[in-house]
Image (cartoon, grey):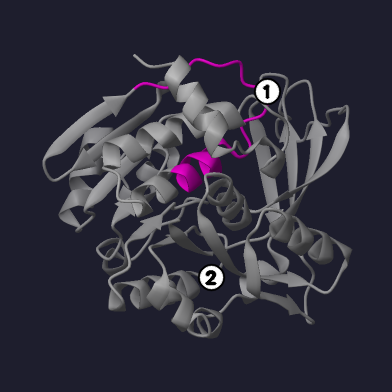
């Protein structure tokens, strides 16, 4: 079983269904209100666990009802939480999400305890890092913490997958230490400063990015390595809620990479998991099992 270490965010998602996404100054009357466990870090940890990865989470929550519920949810998904700290000084992170009728979403995050995850939390997991097969990180906790995790992984020759979300510019030194970078189109633009995809890819490769997997939503993914540039189409599904589709993609890809599968095959798993996640409501409730992903791949071959 592949061992995955996830350093990242743990949120409670507060979700409202809306007929359309509100514009500036516009009030939209919503429909159903629901709460779901979320946060990019926790979502990707659950996605990896449901793909049969052996997952450990490094993160923080507050000492509150949301925090207790989120830790319980991780445990129910067989994720090790010994390095999830209950922070007495701040509240659990929350994300306010408006999901429109076409399944697209708008998200506002109050980071709370996620921004208290520090390099010390990473160093306290040093023994785990030494034994892990892959480190999976995102950008919903402090950049210095992400950098500390990447440095520690490099020291132990552990491969690193970075999902650079939410979008922000990153130091070139950090980018050069990532094994697989998985931006969407907006994140690619912000990282590179280039609107044109070809120029953006060229620039990131020049900065030392080894393997680039650009997620393209309904258009699939583009995989760019030193000796390959391939577009892989998406699976056609009826999207209900795309909130955690990217997290499903990253978790599934990470596990299959950690098992030693080639990057293209791992991306195929990611595309299938992301497609399935988009067909269900909520972040973590939508994340598919390995069995579901492999059956979906068999049905949709070719």
On the image, the x and y values in percent for residue 203 come to 20, 48
On the image, the x and y values in percent for residue 282 come to 72, 37
Residue indicated by mark 1: 240
Choose between 234 and 216: the one closer to the eye: 234
- Residue drawn at x 36%, y 21% as measured from the top left: 233
Residue indicated by mark 2: 142
| Quadrant in the rendering for residue 281 | top right
Residue 236 sits inside the magenta stretch: yes
Q: Which residues are magenta?
A: 233-252
Q: Main secondary structure of the magenta part?
A: loop
Measure how far apart labels 1 and 2 are at the Cα level: 31 Å
**Is 297 on the left-hand or right-hand side of 211?**
right
Choose between 186 and 148: the one closer to the eye: 148
For mark 2, give the secondary structure: loop
Does residue 196 appear in this view? no
Choose between 301 and 24: the one closer to the eye: 301
């Amino acid at each position: 079983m592949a061992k995955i270490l996830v350093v990242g965010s743990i949120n409670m998602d507060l979700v409202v269904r809306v007929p359309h996404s509100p514009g500036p100054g516009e009030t939209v009357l919503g429909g159903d209100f629901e709460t779901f466990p979320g946060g990019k870090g926790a979502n990707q940890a659950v996605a990896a666990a449901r793909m049969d990865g052996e997952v450990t989470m490094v993160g923080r929550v507050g000492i509150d009802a949301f925090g207790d519920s989120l830790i319980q949810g991780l445990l129910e998904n067989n994720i090790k939480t010994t390095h999830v700290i209950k922070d007495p000084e701040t509240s659990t992170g929350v994300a306010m999400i408006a999901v429109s009728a076409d399944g697209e979403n708008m998200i506002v995050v109050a980071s709370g305890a996620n921004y208290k995850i520090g390099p010390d939390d990473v160093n306290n997991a040093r023994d785990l890092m030494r034994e892990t097969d892959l480190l999976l990180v995102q950008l919903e906790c402090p950049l210095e913490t992400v950098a500390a995790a990447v440095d520690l992984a490099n020291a132990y020759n552990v491969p690193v997958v970075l999902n650079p979300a939410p979008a922000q510019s990153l130091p070139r030194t950090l980018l050069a230490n990532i094994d697989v970078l998985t931006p969407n189109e907006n994140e690619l633009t912000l990282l590179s400063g280039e609107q044109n995809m070809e120029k953006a890819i060229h620039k990131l490769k020049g900065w030392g990015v080894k393997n680039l997997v650009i997620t393209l939503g309904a258009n699939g993914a583009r995989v760019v390595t030193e000796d390959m540039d391939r577009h892989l189409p998406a699976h056609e599904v009826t999207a209900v809620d795309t909130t955690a589709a990217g997290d499903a993609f990253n978790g599934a890809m990470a596990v299959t990479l950690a098992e030693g599968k080639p990057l293209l095959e791992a991306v195929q798993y990611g595309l299938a998991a992301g497609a399935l996640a988009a067909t269900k409501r909520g972040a973590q409730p939508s994340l598919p099992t390995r069995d579901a992903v492999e059956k979906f791949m068999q049905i949709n071959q070719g």
